[in-house]
Amino acid sequence: MTAQFSRYVALGDSFTEGVGDELPDGRVRGWADFVALGLQAASDEPIGYANLAIRGRKLGPIITEQLEPALALSPDLMTFNGGGNDIMRPRVTISWVVDETLKLVDRALQLDGLHVAVLAGANPSRHLPMGGLMQKRGDQLADAVLSALRSKPVTLVNNWADETLTDGRYWSADKLHLNALGHARVASNVLTALNVPVPEEWGIDEVAEAGSGQRSRNTARYYREYVLPWIGRRVTGRSSGDGREPKRATLLPVD
């Protein structure tokens, strides 16, 4: 039986905002937009969709800035991903991330009729400088969070363990964010976990079966355009999300 949802709200950082899947007009799309499209395709009624995610946000600000506004929209489906920016900092306590995630889930489950889906992000470590450290921390984060939530009445989507998503064809030029193909595959993982049909026209299986892409080198240009600006923001305490508002702060019809 296909799950039915009509009011969908997404919380998170750049992964949920959709960075890497840029449209010609400069907007970003991303997996949460694809999930909303899938929900609409499976429903005879209009679907409302809001996306409160903001790039660069660590877990603490995601919870304090996005959770209560999301619940105020009275959703019947909420997706959450957080902690990815935390594990990229020099010091992070995985147990703290787990505890805060559990608090968020428990608060959300107090809302009658709300179903929560918690996502582990996709794994970019194969393509990044110092990827081994991110692999280790990402493994710890995904295992700890998903294990802690298995006793909760929530849907778990472990994109970190999706080996297909590690292929370079699914990643944008900065190698940290998914491209359109990657975001579509994550959306497929989410819809499948929610027992919602994945639109055949997305071609998810065909792309996966097409074979692996070549692993690209991290050139001097790559370091200049992506790594050094990231280091600069860390040194000066800035974030790529400074001054940004959620791209879709209220429930709007799926377009």
Image: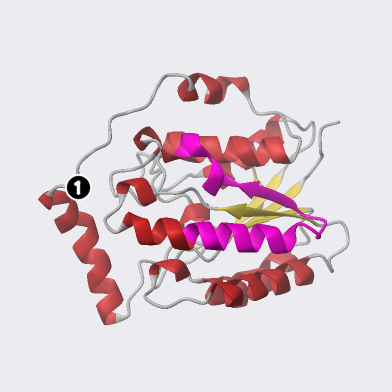
Q: Amino acid at mark 1?
A: Asn
Q: Does 149 lie within the magenta span? A: yes
- Whole-percent x, y for residue 33 in the image: 56, 43
Residue 200 shown in magenta: no
User: Residue 63 at what x, y percent from top left?
Assistant: 61, 73
Q: Is residue 34 above or below residue 105?
A: above
Query: Against 241, is 254 above or below?
Result: above
Q: Residue furthest left?
A: 220
Would residue 1 appear left or right of 245 to someone viewing this image? right
**Location of the N terminus (image quadrant):** top right
Residue 215 relative to residue 118: left or right: left
Mark 1 surroundings within 10 Å by alpha-carbon count, few (fewer than 14), some (14 through 19), many (20 or more): some
Depth check, front residue: 40 or 131: 131
Q: Viewer-proximal residue, 137 or 100?
A: 137
Q: Can you say which quadrant of the picture contains the C terminus?
A: top right
- Of residue 104 and residue 88, the one placed in the foreground of this image is 88
User: In percent of the image, x 65 and y 28: which residue is there?
Assistant: 198
Q: Which residue is mark 1?
A: 218
Residue 86 picture location, percent across and down: 46, 70
Total numbered labels placed on residues in the image: 1
Taken as a whole, is the magenta stretch helix, strand or loop? Answer: helix
What residue lies at 35% left-to-right and 56% top-to-bottom?
A: 132
User: In the image, which residues are magenta?
Assistant: 138-165
